[in-house]
Image (tube, grey):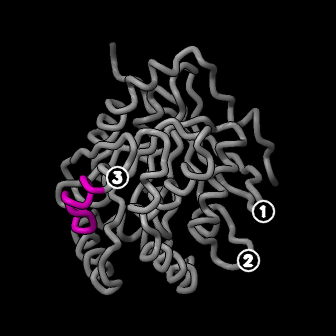
Amino acid sequence: MGMQPDRVPSAVRIRAGTHRVAVRYTDSPDRSRTPVLLVHGMVASTRYLAPTMARLARDRAVVAPDLPGVGNTPRSGPPASMYDDAEVLGGVLAAGAGPAFVVAHSGGCHSATELALRNPDLIRYLVLVSPPQNRRAPSAIIARWTWAMAHEPPSLVRDLLREGLRCGPRMVWAAFRDLCTYRLEAALPQVRCPVLVVRGTKDPLLSRTWAAHLAGLARDGRHVEVRGGHSLPYTAPEHLVETVSGAVSDLDRTLHGRGTARSLEQSSPNVP
């Protein structure tokens, strides 16, 4: 059988709490496969997740929201915290995207983990890709992030810098503060669903030891490594999707027949 062509994402705006959230999504003709919710990293939009979204969408529905203040979702009021982001993600799932497998990257792993704690019935599997190791001094985290970006494609770095400048220093600082203070090691033991921690072999922000430690804290956790750096959804989408698909395939078969996901477009109203 030949490779399925990439599906072109549609766009919709939905109401999630007090926010009008811009969501990119693809539907799948195979409703037996659990959809995926993609969660972007700190002060970034869904744009850099496009390579991974395209590959995941070959055989299942994928939903990728821009969280408040980034991409095409405006900020309403003060900068949203990662707890606010978790609430928004819950609203997206409740609007028709869930139950789902959740694949989060970098700082988005914190919001996704909080989402799993708040909405356990809507999360079937939690995949944490490159969760930053934040038990370091803030200056050390910044230094390691700078080193990581120096080894990423210039096109990605330009996009992230543009988004950071557009968001402004107040939002960047608020996101960085959340990144430094949220404790994944305290939250993961409370997560009910299976957890997969994915580390890039050359990621300076996450050591192999810490990735294994995080996975070991989960009730049903494991960790794997994918060749690459910190930004695997952009630089190694094929290997990442192969890893994710392999992890969730058995659970997908178990869940088959228990019901199908609703269409996001049909379940949630457009917000002008």
Q: Residue placed at 34% from the left, 33% from the top? A: 247
The first of marks 1 and 3 along the sequence is: 1
Callout 2 crowding tier (Cα within 10 Å): few <14, some 14–19, many ≥20: few
Place residue 55 in its image quadrant.
top left
User: Which range of residues does the magenta coloring cover?
Assistant: 203-213
Foreground: 238 or 85? 85
Residue labelled with disc 1:
18
Depicted 241 relative to depicted 207: above or below:
above
The first of marks 2 and 3 along the sequence is: 2
Q: Where is residue 75 in the image (x, y as percent from the top left)?
A: 69, 71
Callout 1 crowding tier (Cα within 10 Å): few <14, some 14–19, many ≥20: few
Q: Can residue 234 be seen in this view?
A: no
Q: Are marks 2 and 1 in contact (CB under 8 Å)?
A: yes
- Specify the quadrant that holds the C terminus: bottom right
The kind of residue tagged 1 is: Thr
Q: Position of residue 35 (x, y in %)?
A: 54, 33
Residue labelled with disc 2:
77
Q: Residue placed at 31% from the left, 86% from the top? A: 139
Q: Residue placed at 39% from the left, 43% from the top? A: 219
Q: Whole-Å distance between the Cαs marked 2 and 1?
A: 10 Å
Q: Is residue 208 magenta?
A: yes
Depicted 167 relative to depicted 29: above or below:
below
Q: Where is residue 260 in the image (x, y as percent from the top left)?
A: 63, 22
Label 2 vs label 3, nearer the camera: 3
Q: Is mark 2 on a helix, strand or loop?
A: loop
Q: Whole-Å distance between the Cαs marked 2 and 3?
A: 36 Å
Place residue 137 in its image quadrant.
bottom left
Task: Say the numbered circle drawn on residue 217.
Answer: 3
Foreground: 227 or 251? 251
The first of marks 2 and 1 along the sequence is: 1
The kind of residue tagged 3 is: Leu
